Image: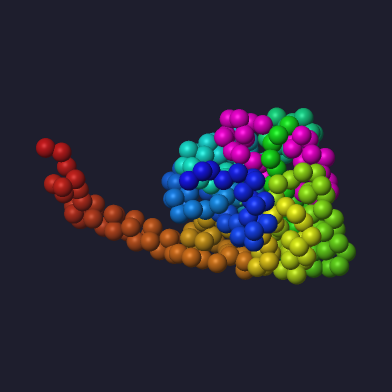
Amino acid sequence: MAQKTILDLRRMKDEGEKITVLTAYDYPFARLMDAEGIDVILVGDSVGSVVSGYDTTLPVTMDEMLYHTRAVVRGASGALVVADMPFMSYQADIIEARRNAGRLIKEGGAQAVKLEGGMNMAETIRALVDIDIPVVGHIGLTPQSIHRMGGYKVQGRQEQQAERLLADARAVEQAGACAVVLEAIPASLAGKITAELAIPTIGIGAGPDCDGQVLVIHDILGLCEKYSPKFVKQYADAATLIRGAVRDYIDEVKKGAFPTEKHSFK
Ligand code: KIV
């Protein structure tokens, strides 16, 4: 199967085929979801929260994103790989944004980058697209803006906020983005944005009318035991599975039931 490209995303929108996106941060997860036919793998800066144990995504560095992107790329042969630009890798100036986005493509092996922001990031998106780096936008609840938003809150509920988000979506499209993530916004607003834009919208907590959906892999597997947002659907209880396996291993080693002859060399 040929590897998906950004052209496939646009075609899928045009043909009404939903786009499936999951996050991955390492080779084994990427390989498994790629084999099952996921369309896009996002190396999200959510790695900071779900893998590194930080409270926010803000501490994630370029080096960390490069490390995780390379691992995911090695496991993905069919899915399009999109790498998140971490906080302060693109906000300070456009030259730095170009260098860092370029590193995620050249050293990381991703086919596109994602960055957060709407009208305020239009110039940066344009600067990356102009040097042939495909960009996925991200508006609504943007976790890198946690301190401005005062928490992880649904965005765009008030009319003025909704108008601003619509303008953000238009700006991201006009700047040349190939798709846009809509996070934690009312379903009706996401539907309106999806109907108006020619580029695909990928929803997370944005209702059923987006062109595609994204979730964090650790959330759908039940591995984030501290907190689960309303928009998450858990498809498996991997935490219980892991706990059980670890308990069994501890018991067997303590009892001398493992290793046996079967696991030993002559
Ligand atoms: O970092 C991430 O995982 C994301 C998705 C939740 C959209 O940005």
Q: Position of residue 127 (x, y in %)?
A: 78, 35
In front: 172, or 3? 3
Q: Verify whether residue 215 appears in magenta.
A: no
Would you say 75 lies left or right of 6 here? left
Q: Which colour scheme is used?
A: rainbow
Q: Looking at the image, can residue 261 be seen?
A: yes
Q: Which residue lies furthest to the right in this view?
A: 160
In front: 114, or 261? 114
Would you say 162 lies left or right of 114 here? right
Q: Looking at the image, can residue 202 be seen?
A: no
Q: Position of residue 61 (x, y in %)?
A: 63, 38
Q: Where is residue 246 in the image (x, y as percent from the top left)?
A: 34, 56
Q: Where is residue 37 in the image (x, y as percent from the top left)?
A: 49, 53
Q: In this view, does 211 lie above or below 262?
A: below
Instruction: Tell me what residue is drawn at x 20 percent, y 48 percent.
Output: 259
Which contiguous range is marked in magenta? Answer: 102-130
Q: Verify whether residue 124 appears in magenta.
A: yes
Instruction: Tell me what residue is drawn at x 64 percent, y 41 percent.
Output: 112
In front: 55, or 117? 117
Instruction: Tell me what residue is drawn at x 60 percent, y 56 percent.
Output: 19
Instruction: Tell me what residue is drawn at x 59 percent, y 38 percent.
Output: 110
